[in-house]
Image (cartoon, rainbow, N blue to C red):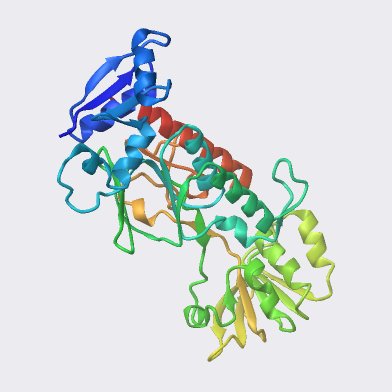
Amino acid sequence: MAKVIIYSTDGCPFCAKAKSFLTEKGISYDGIEVQSGSSVWEEMKKKTGSGSLPQILIGDEPVGGYSDLVNLEAGGELSQKLGLAEEGKGVPLYDVIIIGGGPAGLSAAVYAARKILKTLVVSKDIGGQVAWTYDVDNYLGFSQVDTADLIAKFEDHVEKYGVEKLVGAEVKALELTGKLKKVTTVDGDSYLSKTLIIATGKRPRPLNVPGEKELTGRGVTYCSTCDAALFEGFDVAVMGGGNSALESVFDLMKVSPKIYMVSLTSVTGDEILQDKVMSSPKVEIFTEYKILRIEGESSVEGIEIESLKTGKTKKLSVQGIIVEIGLLPNSELVMDIVETNRTGEIIVDSRCHTGVSGVFACGDVTNVPYKQIIVAAGEGAKAALSAYDYIIKQR
């Protein structure tokens, strides 16, 4: 095996990380202590071309610092440089893997990258729940911004730091009990990381009534931003009584001749939204009604609803249904590993710790109150900083 030399100094976190990395891999090395401006420092600069610490040489070849060492391992080149027989391509190793590409996950990625942590974002999409709305007018610095523009700004910010992303990938399994966390996707690819940040957000809650599954995508949808335009000229029912339902009705008012709003409770959304919706002659509201079934063969033809007060039923002829009755946390992958509350949210402390060593969570998938974009972004930053603190304390 080629000789490995590390130039380092006391108190340098990345020097300690480089040494720990090699120790974990069973790679022996010679450590040389360096003080800035000393003859040893000048010798290091001459050999490596850099005055920053740590500096690592394999044989006579300078390979850079800690992040460069990790990159060599991730690309399967470290064994080759060491002169070891390589048994196939190694499993990529990261400082932090972030699952989720919404505001929490992307904010975590920016903060992790700024701490020079080798970072991977794994997500089905970029934007998360933000993509379900039309515009945002309560994000600091923007009096009003189109969500597509906001998501693009988030992504551009992450791209600035060259963070690796697996977009369109779905995580199949997690192994979190060991010192290194293992993430496996449905494609069968595996990735190792010293820490994991779960930022998987939430998904729409289904109605669980006859006809829903059969007609999803055939008139039943869960996103007015995505699909409202498809209902131009058609009558539509919106299920729910909160802000999301009111926003859906407002979107539909631009394209649909008739919109029914059906809610188990009284309308609970913001008054400014209620005023907009209730002043429209297109909208008819049914409060304290539940849906019994969705009717239709190849597409939605109508719904049957029942009054909670009288028990009387009523049929509404509609060609579309938008479901806005709340969200469920995407925590299934870790339900048996981390602690969750009765609604399935991951319980975290003020530093986004889950209780499992090296595993953090942030955003709407957690029990942190007030599910807002700005809150999720802040929690993502905290999670990344906590992951960084965890890593530098490992020896």
Can you tell which quarter of the image residue 304 is in? bottom right
Q: Is residue 246 above or below residue 157?
A: below
The one of 391 and 136 positioned closer to us in this rendering: 391
The one of 99 and 376 positioned closer to us in this rendering: 99
Residue positioned 57% across, 57% down in the render: 129
Specify the quadrant that holds the N terminus: top left
Left or right of residue 79: residue 187:
right
Q: Residue furthest top?
A: 38
Specify the quadrant that holds the C terminus: top left
The one of 350 and 80 positioned closer to us in this rendering: 80
Place of residue 374 in the rendered image (x, y in percent of width and height, measured from the top left): 63, 43
Place of residue 342 in the rendered image (x, y in percent of width and height, measured from the top left): 42, 51
Q: Is residue 248 above or below residue 293?
A: above
Left or right of residue 279: residue 100:
left
Can you tell which quarter of the image residue 318 is in? bottom right
Place of residue 309 in the rendered image (x, y in percent of width and height, measured from the top left): 64, 71
Residue positioned 48% across, 45% down in the render: 163
Res. 194 in view: no
Residue positioned 32% across, 41% down in the render: 72
Res. 362 in view: yes
